[in-house]
Image (tube, helix red, strand yellow):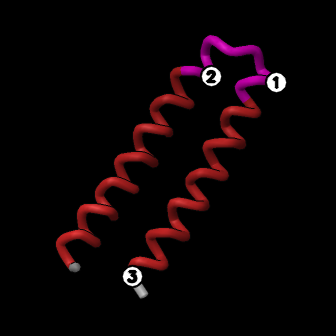
Amino acid sequence: MTEEKNEIEKLIDTMISSGDDLVKNIKTVLPDSMAESVEMFHESNIANLKKIKEFLNK
């Protein structure tokens, strides 16, 4: 189980960093209002992913 937990945590970290990169790049081509929505959506995803990570560490 520990190995699976580590793999899931690595996946979550990758999802967060990839999302950060995507949002950073996409903000340059979107209108401000849409870029803000994408950023808010990503922040919500990060919060949920961190909750999953916390649950795994219980």
The residue positioned 61% from the left and 16% from the top of the image is: 28
Graded by Cα atoms within 10 Å as few (under 14), some (14 to 19) or many (20 or more), the crowding at tag 1 reads few
**Apparent side of residue 18 relative to residue 4 in the rendered image (left or right):** right
Vertical arrangement, residue 6 with respect to residue 23, above or below: below
Is tag 3's residue or tag 2's residue first in the polypeptide sequence? 2
**Apparent side of residue 1 relative to residue 16 in the rendered image (left or right):** left
Graded by Cα atoms within 10 Å as few (under 14), some (14 to 19) or many (20 or more), the crowding at tag 2 reads some
Amino acid type, callout 1: Ser
Between disc 1 and disc 3, the foreground one is: 3
The residue to which callout 2 is attached is: 27
The residue positioned 75% from the left and 33% from the top of the image is: 37
Q: Which residues are magenta?
A: 26-35
At which x and y percent is residue 19? 49, 38
At which x and y percent is residue 45? 59, 51
Q: In this orientation, which residue lies closer to the viewer: 14 or 27?
A: 14
The residue to which callout 1 is attached is: 33
Amino acid type, callout 2: Lys
The residue to which callout 3 is attached is: 57
Do the residues bearing badges 1 and 3 touch, measured as CB atoms within 8 Å?
Answer: no
Vertical arrangement, residue 43 with respect to residue 28, above or below: below
Is tag 1's residue or tag 3's residue first in the polypeptide sequence? 1
At which x and y percent is residue 8? 32, 62
Farthest residue, direction top: 29
The residue positioned 68% from the left and 42% from the top of the image is: 41
> Real-space Cα distance between discs 3 and 2?
33 Å
Amino acid type, callout 3: Asn
The image quarter containing residue 31 is: top right
**Apparent side of residue 22 relative to residue 37 in the rendered image (left or right):** left
Task: Name the quarter where the N terminus is drawn.
Answer: bottom left
